[in-house]
Image (tube, grey):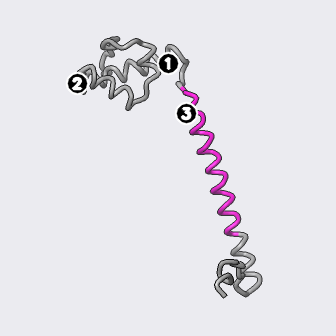
Amino acid sequence: MPRKITQNTYGLSEEEVCKLGNSELKAKAHSKGLNEDQMKELKSYRRLLRIRCYGKRFRTKERDEINTLKFQKEILMQEKIRLERELKSYRHSAQTEIHIFDPFKWADN
């Protein structure tokens, strides 16, 4: 049986509760002197507030930027893997090792 969520923000505004992330909310809760059970209630109520205020999914601008960067990282990783495979195939087909010119190696001479 799900527990009843109290609609108590413990002195914080509903808008403030909605916008704060976990660490900020925890810091505010500790500064107000809330215990762990009250903190859990506040987080559950925040979930309901976000659904009510922002629709089913709550996304901040920062979260969208993070997801964009993760997607770009994944594309770059796939490109890196493709290039490594291509390099291996060139090495295999040439039957000799490909030597990459290193200008710093010859600078000492």
In this rendering, which labeled residue sits more in front, label 1 or label 2? 2
Query: Alpha-carbon distance for marks 2 and 3?
Result: 28 Å
Q: Amino acid at mark 3?
A: Arg
How busy is the neighbourhood of tag 2: few (under 14 within 10 Å), some, or many (20 plus)?
A: few
Q: Position of residue 81 (x, y in %)?
A: 65, 63
Q: Which residue is mark 3?
A: 63
Q: Position of residue 93 (x, y in %)?
A: 76, 81
Q: Nearer the viewer, residue 60 or 106?
A: 106
First-in-chain label (1 vs 2): 2
- Identify the secondary structure beneath mark 1: helix
Q: Amino acid at mark 2?
A: Asn
Q: Which residue is mark 2?
A: 35
Q: Amino acid at mark 1?
A: Ile
First-in-chain label (1 vs 3): 1
Residues shaded magenta: 59-85
First-in-chain label (2 vs 3): 2
Query: Circles 2 and 3: CB distance less than 8 Å?
Result: no
The image shows a total of numbered marks equal to: 3
Q: Nearer the viewer, residue 98 or 95?
A: 98
Q: Position of residue 30 (x, y in %)?
A: 27, 25
The residue drawn where x is 70% and y is 85% is 97
Q: Position of residue 107 (x, y in %)?
A: 67, 81
The residue drawn where x is 70% and y is 65% is 83
- Identify the secondary structure beneath mark 3: helix
- Identify the secondary structure beneath mark 2: loop
Q: Which residue is mark 1?
A: 51
The vertical placement of 76 against 63, above or below, is: below
Whether residue 99 sits left or right of residue 19 in the image: it is right
Q: Quadrant of residue 60?
A: top right
Q: Quadrant of residue 69?
A: top right
The vertical placement of 52 against 80, above or below, is: above
